[in-house]
Image (spheres, rainbow, N blue to C red):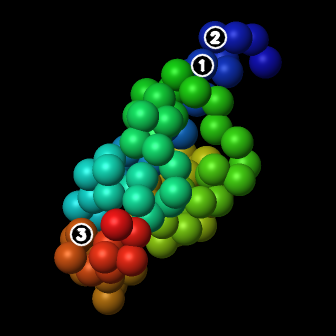
């Protein structure tokens, strides 16, 4: 894999993370609290400027309530039919 291909892949995964986060109604700081990853690190991951570790991928996916493979797959992540998908469905009080 060339450096250009790697950068494209990182940007694709980061874009998926951002899309799911926004679809869930979470801002960057809320996802940071839920995942335990700093907002600045998440920003770099979402823009494809930081290589994502597997452990971080699992933490982000868990916080977004999806499987880690969904962030690697190029198909859109769809919320379940009983999922509200808004930040009020998350208990952020435990993370402050």
Q: Residue furthest front?
A: 96
Residue underneath mark 2: 4
- Quarter holding the N terminus is top right
The percent coordinates of residue 4 (x first, y second) are 63, 11
For label 2, the crowd category at 10 Å Cα-Cα, with few meaning under 14, some 14 to 19 and many 20 or more, is few
Residue at x 52%, y 57% (from the top left corner)? 36
Q: Mark 3 — residue?
A: 87
**Who comes first in sequence, dot 2 or dot 3?**
2
| Residue, disc 1 | 7
Residue at horizontal 55 percent and vertical 68 percent from the top: 62
Question: Disc 1 on helix, strand or loop?
Answer: helix
Question: The residue tagged with tag 3: helix, strand or loop?
Answer: helix
Q: Position of residue 23 (x, y in %)?
A: 28, 58
In the rendered image, residue 7, in percent from the top left (x then y), is placed at 60, 19
Q: Which is more N-terminal, label 1 or label 3?
A: 1
Q: Position of residue 94 (x, y in %)?
A: 39, 77
Residue located at (64% from left, 59% from top): 58
Q: Is residue 84 left or right of residue 48?
A: left
Residue 48 visible to the viewer: yes
Mark 3 or mark 1, whichever is nearer to me: 3
Q: Quadrant of residue 67?
A: bottom right
* Horizontal side of residue 9 vs 35, given as left or right: right
The residues tagged by marks 3 and 1 sit, at their Cα atoms, a distance apart of: 30 Å
Q: Is residue 80 above or below residue 27?
A: below
At a point 70% along the width and 11% down the height, the residue shown is 3
Where, quadrant-wise, is the C terminus in this rendering?
A: bottom left
Whole-number angstrom distance, CA of label 1 to CA of label 2: 5 Å
Q: Is residue 1 left or right of residue 34?
A: right
């Amino acid at each position: 894999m060339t450096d250009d291909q790697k950068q494209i892949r990182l940007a694709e995964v980061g874009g998926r993370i951002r899309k799911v986060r926004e679809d869930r109604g979470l801002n960057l700081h809320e996802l940071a609290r839920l995942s335990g990853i700093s907002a600045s690190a998440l920003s770099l991951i979402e823009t494809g400027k930081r290589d994502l570790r597997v452990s971080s991928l699992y933490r982000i996916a868990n916080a977004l309530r999806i499987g880690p493979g969904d962030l690697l797959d190029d198909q859109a992540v769809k919320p379940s039919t009983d999922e509200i998908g808004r930040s009020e469905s998350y208990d952020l009080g435990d993370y402050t």
